[in-house]
Image (cartoon, grey):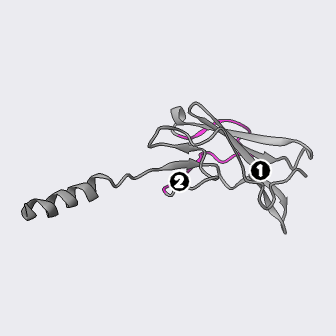
Amino acid sequence: MVRFVLPISLLLALGTGVSAECVACPNCDYERISIEQGDACINFWTCSGDTITCTYPSVANPGTWNNCSYSASTGWALADGPSEICFSGAGANAKCEAPNNPYNNAIPGCTASYGLINGTNGQLL
């Protein structure tokens, strides 16, 4: 009986190690607020189906937002949004920690429908 304990426990340890990869919005876009402040950064994101939309304050049009959408069907490349402002692709994050990861490839699916980040440079201008 003791002979089987080690091999079975080893198989269980190896077999339960799930490696998840989440998709994250770029922290900031390419729209510069100022040299001192840097670029506009994410305020919130939404997720529906296989698409995440990352929302940043607009510098060119104060009081409005820029939306950058990325989709699993495009390999997480930019699917919709101004290419001069949005990054060309969403980022991968192996840690899958909320609230920064709208989509989990292991599920596959949205981790939530909405996430508020509202960090530095993320407020309406």
Using the image, determine if residue 35 lies above or below residue 52: below
Pointers 1 and 2 in contact (C-beta within 8 Å): no
What kind of residue is marked 1?
Answer: Asn
Residue corresponding to mark 2: 96
Front position in the image: 83 or 25: 25
Q: Residue 76's x, y, as percent?
A: 55, 41
Q: Residue 35's x, y, as percent?
A: 83, 66
What kind of residue is marked 2?
Answer: Cys
Q: Main secondary structure of the magenta part?
A: loop
User: Is residue 90 covered in magenta?
Assistant: yes
Label 2 neighbourhood size at 10 Å, few (<14), some (14-19), many (20+)?
A: many
Q: Quadrant of the N terminus?
A: bottom left
SS at circle 1: loop
Occupied quadrant, residue 61: top right
Residue corresponding to mark 1: 43
What residue lies at 46% left-to-right and 40% top-to-bottom?
A: 107
Of circles 1 and 2, the one toward us is: 2
What residue lies at 34% left-to-right and 55% top-to-bottom?
A: 17
In the image, taking residue 54 as reference, residue 96 lies left or right, namely: left
Q: Residue 79's x, y, as percent?
A: 63, 34
- Give the magenta-colored segment's residue range: 76-94
Label 1 neighbourhood size at 10 Å, few (<14), some (14-19), many (20+)?
A: many
Using the image, determine if residue 15 lies above or below residue 3: above
Label 1 or label 2, whichever comes before in sequence order: 1
Occupied quadrant, residue 88: top right
Front position in the image: 83 or 117: 117
